[in-house]
Image: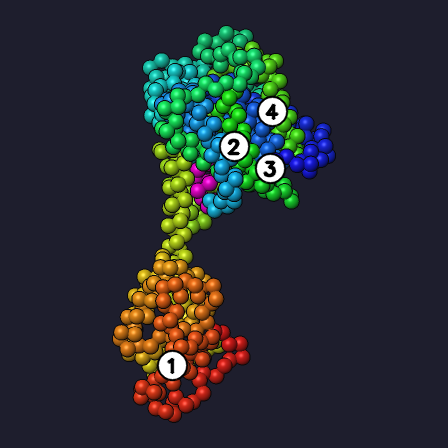
């Protein structure tokens, strides 16, 4: 909940925050209109979301600099929901997603964002940019949006309609707006060229009376009264899966945006659980005013930080300015050509793609390149949540493979020096000392079993376990199987340097008892080798002279 510290910070630099909020509102206006149109609920839904969700998330969210509202990623998810359930379905899904986000906040799930690999995020962003661009093809070409919920199919059909009946006016307006935004951003990044381009396109369309410049249409003067015009309760069960997808996307994008804001400042850290709570509350209330589901918006948050915002007052100002526009300038906004908004979103999609970051990611490792490409392709062909799941799954499999390859089982020197002579002496006594390096878990355990049980002409094996990093139940079971098989062949297995953190897993499956010799455990490798020689002497394998010698001399810096 808001604290006194939040209020104190809002009073610290009010002028800077008010100016930053005004700048963000100017940038957010065409985006809110465009994303509202793209979602299928109309421009007024985008404005309502920017005002209501933007204000609530600013007050209750976990980042002082986050700016929330409708985003391109969310519209990608909403299009098929509108097609299947209508506007009421989107409003219901938004409310359900808000409840899910609040539950995630109460469960302290906000910290999970740090486990999403960078290639998944980059591939996700690239895929979203492609989807947003393809979604704008019908409006940019001035043709009615074809039916369907697959952007590739819809864009292809729209291009076919344009070929049969070209609308050069709409295409020219969309390309001109996109070009002004892209060139202007390189020339003077601080100037809101999106608003200037949209105003210019609207003025030209009105003065010249251009045919084919279809406007947004009438907007209601002000926000609609709170309403509960949702779907029938019988359809709630079928909306659970879409609501989970919307909630997952809202959490992912909002936490990513908040992390970006942290990275652009010094000494600021957002509260991920509070951020989820704020976004959940915003998504519960926003549908009651006809708004679509909202998330933290990376582009608007970045503008907020760059223009000098220091507190939540900037985000609140952004929402208040948009509310004033809704109440005072709805007739003017309704004259904006749809093609101009399509141009804004086309430029936004292009600017979302960081070519340098993509190039660096694909060059890092082959695994990173595979994860990025698969996530982007899944985002384009399937949906965003499935794409993230696929990216995480592939990243997990590749990471496990990389970690498993680090696990080694090899005869190594007994300390940091060169002791090959001592090793050969041990082998002559039918003793081998192995050091297990790395994790002993399910991904590497079976290879370990094969290597260990292929020993020949050995009577005692000493396992040096102080370098084992992780032991899970699978690794403990495989170790037990290996020790059992070696003992059946008459080979004694001893262990040294077992860490206290690993004892529970080893003891739970009974392997710890198998590794004890005469009820003893060995803290160091020399002690275990001494016990091995004593055992072989009693069995008559070694002459008494060999067994009575001192065990391996302890080196200056002895390692277990």
**Residue under numbered circle 4:** 319
Residue 30: which disc? none
Quarter-wise, where is residue 514 in the image? bottom left
**Which residue is painted at 34% across and 20% down in the image?**
147
Q: How many numbered marks have been drawn onto this rendered protein structure?
A: 4
Give the structural element (helix, strand or loop) at label 4. helix
Relative to the observer, which residue lies in front, 272 or 98?
98
Q: Residues within 10 Å of mark 2 (few under 14, many from 20)?
A: many
Residue labelled with disc 2? 280
Q: Quick one: label 4 or label 3, which is nearer the N terminus?
A: 3
Residue 28 is situated, as x and y percent measured from the top left of the image, at 56, 25
Q: Residues within 10 Å of mark 1 (few under 14, many from 20)?
A: many
**Marks 2, 4: nearer the viewer:** 2
The mark nearer the N terminus, 4 or 1, is: 4
Proximity of marks 4 and 3: CB atoms separated by less than 8 Å: no
* Mark pair 2, 1: CA separation: 64 Å
Q: Which residues are magenta?
A: 117-125
The secondary structure that dominates the magenta segment is: helix
Residue 203, above or below 136:
above
Name which quarter of the figure residue 162 lies in: top left
Report which residue position mark 3 lands on: 63
Return the x and y of residue 154 as percentages of the image width and height. 35, 23
Q: Give the quadrant of the N terminus.
A: top right
Label 1 belongs to which residue?
532
- The location of residue 3, given as percent across then percent down, is 66, 36
The image's colouring method is rainbow
Residues under labels 3 and 1: Cα distance? 61 Å
Whether 521 is drawn above or below 158: the answer is below
Label 3, residues with CA under 10 Å away: few <14, some 14-19, many ≥20: many
């Amino acid at each position: 909940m808001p604290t006194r510290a939040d209020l104190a910070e809002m009073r610290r630099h009010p002028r800077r925050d008010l100016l930053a909020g005004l700048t963000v509102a100017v940038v957010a206006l065409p985006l809110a209109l465009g994303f509202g149109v793209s979602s299928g609920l109309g421009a007024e839904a985008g404005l309502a979301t920017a005002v209501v969700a933007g204000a609530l998330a600013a007050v209750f969210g976990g980042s002082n600099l986050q700016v929330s509202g409708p985003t391109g990623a969310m519209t990608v998810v909403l299009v098929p929901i509108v097609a299947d359930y209508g506007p009421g379905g989107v409003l219901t899904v938004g409310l359900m997603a808000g409840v899910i986000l609040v539950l995630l906040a109460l469960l302290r799930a906000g910290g999970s964002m740090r486990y999403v690999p960078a290639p998944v995020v980059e591939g996700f962003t690239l895929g979203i940019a492609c989807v947003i661009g393809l979604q704008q093809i019908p409006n940019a070409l001035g043709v009615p949006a074809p039916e369907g919920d697959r952007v590739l199919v819809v864009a292809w059909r729209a291009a076919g309609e344009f070929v049969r009946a070209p609308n050069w006016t709409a295409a020219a307006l969309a390309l001109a707006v996109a070009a002004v935004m892209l060139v202007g951003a390189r020339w003077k990044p601080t100037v809101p060229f999106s608003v200037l381009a949209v105003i210019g396109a609207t003025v030209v369309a009105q003065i010249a009376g251009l045919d084919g410049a279809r406007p947004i249409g009438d907007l209601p003067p002000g926000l609609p009264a709170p309403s509960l015009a949702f779907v029938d309760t019988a359809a709630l069960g079928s909306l659970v899966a879409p609501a989970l997808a919307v909630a997952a996307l809202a959490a992912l994008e909002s936490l990513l945006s908040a992390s970006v804001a942290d990275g652009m400042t010094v000494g600021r850290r957002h509260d991920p659980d509070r951020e989820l709570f704020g976004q959940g509350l915003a998504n519960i209330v926003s549908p009651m005013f006809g708004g679509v589901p909202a998330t933290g918006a990376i582009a608007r948050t970045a503008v907020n930080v760059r223009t000098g915002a220091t507190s939540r007052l900037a985000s609140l100002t952004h929402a208040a300015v948009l509310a004033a526009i809704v109440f005072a300038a709805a007739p003017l906004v309704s004259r904006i050509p749809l093609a101009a908004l399509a141009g804004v979103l086309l430029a936004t999609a292009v600017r979302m793609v960081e070519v340098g970051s993509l190039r660096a990611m694909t060059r890092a490792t082959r695994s990173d390149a595979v994860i990025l490409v698969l996530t982007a392709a899944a985002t384009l062909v399937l949906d965003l949540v499935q794409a993230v799941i696929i990216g995480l799954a592939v990243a997990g499999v590749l990471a496990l493979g990389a970690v498993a390859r680090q696990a080694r089982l090899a005869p190594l020197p007994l300390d940091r020096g060169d002791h090959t002579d001592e090793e050969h002496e041990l082998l002559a006594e039918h003793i081998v000392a192995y050091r297990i390096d790395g994790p002993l878990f399910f991904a590497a355990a079976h290879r370990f079993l094969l290597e260990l049980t292929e020993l020949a002409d050995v009577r005692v094996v000493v396992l040096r376990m102080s370098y084992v990093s992780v032991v899970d139940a699978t690794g403990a079971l495989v170790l037990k199987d290996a020790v059992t098989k070696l003992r059946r062949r008459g080979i004694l297995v001893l262990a040294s340097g077992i860490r206290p953190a690993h004892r529970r897993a080893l003891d739970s499956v009974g392997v710890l008892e198998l590794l004890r010799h005469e009820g003893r455990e060995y803290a160091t490798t020399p002690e275990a080798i001494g016990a091995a020689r004593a055992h072989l002497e009693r069995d008559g394998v070694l002459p008494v002279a060999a067994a009575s010698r001192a065990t391996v001399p302890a080196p200056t810096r002895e390692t277990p």
